[in-house]
């Protein structure tokens, strides 16, 4: 059987139930095992930090990952690299947040914890996505690397932040925006180039707006049944919903095992 290099988004693709009731469907776990037995290369492709996604790798027995919105690479269980955001632009953005009294937080290392200068970010968002640690006197200029910036604001107030025109960002939740790398195809290509394989041997699975970046013509694109319309419009194949055996059905249709 032709070996394929298969990349899966997490939320809404591998994982069902949203943030509060997250679970991986049994048919998905079974499909991943069958793909492994068939000799395919399996990887996660997520916007999450490597530390935030590692648990899903372990749960599914996957050893390869594109993390950090395409700018983190893990191969054979080893984190090879994470590219940070442009520090100067991040500092500029935080200065704008201060000007407009918008709470903010930073991710300055590969962990499950972001840092904030006070409690205002947590009080505004009541967020459960990740831990927030308060660092008094927090100053982004003092860090060598900044991987993500979180800005608490309701739409369309983010329009006040002109620096966002020069940084990748997305709104997944009503209460705040994520300023983070947003080119999963960048990481997919890095892994394919590492192994010296043809791009046409890759297959990507996704459901959300942040998966648009890896829905390119170089490889096969599979959209979940619960995917956004923009993603479905670019897909080569649309499967059933994540909680309706979507991964399994696509693998069967594409004759991957």
Image (cartoon, rainbow, N blue to C red):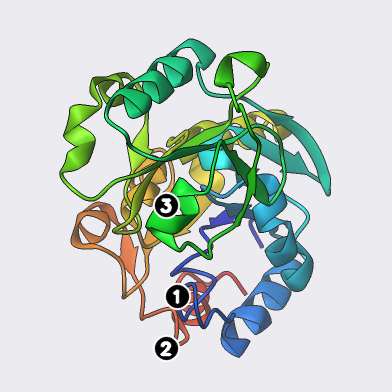
From the image, tell me which residue sits under label 3: 220
Q: Which of pointers 2 and 1 lies earlier in the amino acid sequence?
A: 1
Q: CA distance from mark 3 to mark 1?
A: 26 Å
Q: Is residue 174 left or right of residue 244?
A: left
| 2 vs 3, front mark | 2
Q: Secondary structure at mark 1?
A: loop
Residue 53, disc: none
Q: Which of pointers 3 and 1 lies earlier in the amino acid sequence?
A: 1
**Location of residue 195 in the rendering, given as x and y in whole percent from the top left corner:** 72, 34
At 43% from the left and 70% from the top, the residue drawn is: 12
Q: CA distance from mark 2 to mark 3?
A: 21 Å
Image quadrant for the N terminus? bottom right
Q: Are marks 2 and 3 in contact (CB under 8 Å)?
A: no
Crowding at mark 2 (Cα within 10 Å: few <14, some 14-19, many 20+): some
Q: Secondary structure at mark 2?
A: loop
From the image, tell me which residue sits under label 2: 244
Q: Secondary structure at mark 3?
A: strand
Is residue 5 visible in this depiction of the protein? Answer: no
């Amino acid at each position: 059987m032709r070996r394929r290099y298969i990349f899966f988004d997490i939320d809404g693709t591998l994982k069902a139930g949203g943030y509060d009731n997250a679970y991986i469907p049994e048919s998905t776990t079974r499909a991943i095992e069958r793909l492994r037995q068939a000799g395919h290369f399996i990887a996660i492709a997520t916007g999450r930090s490597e530390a935030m996604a590692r648990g899903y790798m372990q749960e599914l027995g996957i050893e390869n990952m594109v993390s950090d919105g395409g700018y983190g690479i893990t191969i054979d269980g080893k984190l090879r690299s994470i590219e940070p955001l442009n520090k100067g632009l991040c500092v500029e953005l935080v200065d704008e947040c201060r000007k407009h009294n918008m709470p903010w937080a930073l991710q300055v290392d590969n962990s499950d914890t972001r840092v904030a200068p006070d409690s205002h970010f947590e009080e505004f968002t009541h967020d459960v996505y990740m831990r927030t640690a308060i660092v008094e006197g927090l100053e982004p200029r003092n860090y060598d690397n900044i991987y993500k910036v979180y800005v608490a604001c309701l739409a369309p107030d983010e329009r006040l932040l002109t620096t966002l025109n020069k940084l990748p960002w997305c709104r997944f939740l009503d209460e705040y925006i994520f300023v983070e790398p947003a080119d999963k195809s960048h990481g997919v290509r890095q892994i394919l180039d590492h192994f010296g394989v043809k791009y046409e041997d890759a297959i990507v699975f996704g459901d959300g707006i942040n998966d648009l970046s890896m829905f390119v013509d170089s490889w096969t694109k599979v959209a979940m049944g619960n995917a956004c319309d923009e993603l479905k419009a670019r897909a080569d194949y649309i499967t059933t919903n994540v909680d309706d055996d979507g991964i399994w059905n696509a693998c069967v249709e594409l004759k991957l095992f």
